[in-house]
Amino acid sequence: MRALEASSGAARARSGLLRLDRELIVIGILGGLLSGLLGVGGGIVMVPLLVLWARYGQREAHAASLGAIIPISIAGIATYGIAGQVKVGPAIALAVGSVFGARVGAGLLVGIDERLLKIVFGLFLVGVAVLLTTHR
């Protein structure tokens, strides 16, 4: 099952092979669970776990997480939609802005220094944690 076990996460991410490693499945479950429960992007969970547990490079972890967004979103939309909780107008407005922002962000991801990316992502996570715990 783990034919590429000896290789690093970054090498595995670049290999392009479809692999269903247990650690990636667990990371996906955690990302999907928290995405559906808390409405957070799965990347808040997946990126750190891909870097720390699956040994992906920071850039490869971000790219893998971005690739998982569509199925996570579809599952969440279906569940919340059945419950009548999706407000179409705001969702469309968010989607329009997000598509533009994602193109710009992905373009920056390709060229940013990996160390700087780790610092920016870490600061983002800390900032969000502080805001969420102090906001009334």
Image (cartoon, rainbow, N blue to C red):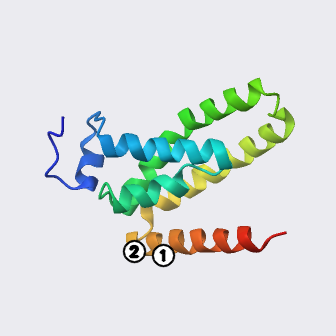
Residue 76: which disc? none
On screen, residue 33 versus residue 50, left or right, reads: right
The residue depicted at 59 percent of the width and 73 percent of the height is: 126
Type of amino acid under label 2: Arg
User: Residue 84, located in which quarter of the rendered image?
Assistant: top right
x%, y% of residue 40?
A: 64, 51
x%, y% of residue 56?
A: 32, 57
On screen, residue 122 versus residue 13, left or right, reads: right
Kindly state the secondary structure of the residue where label 1 is placed.
helix
x%, y% of residue 121?
A: 52, 68
Give the alpha-carbon distance from disc 1 to disc 2, as whole Å.
6 Å
User: Residue 131, located in which quarter of the rendered image?
Assistant: bottom right
Count of marks overlaid on the render? 2
- Residue under pointer 2: 115
Quadrant housing the C terminus: bottom right
The residue depicted at 65 percent of the width and 45 percent of the height is: 37
Sort mark 2 into few (<14), some (14-19) or many (20+) by Cα contacts within 10 Å. Answer: few
x%, y% of residue 26?
A: 40, 44
Whether residue 36 is situated above or below residue 112 in the rendered picture: above
Quadrant housing the N terminus: top left
The residue depicted at 51 percent of the width and 61 percent of the height is: 108
The residue depicted at 49 percent of the width and 47 percent of the height is: 30
Kindly state the secondary structure of the residue where label 2 is placed.
helix
Residue 119: which disc? 1
Residue toward you, 16 or 130:
130
Sort mark 1 into few (<14), some (14-19) or many (20+) by Cα contacts within 10 Å. Answer: few
Q: Residue furthest top?
A: 82
Q: Are marks 1 and 2 in contact (CB under 8 Å)?
A: yes
Type of amino acid under label 1: Ile
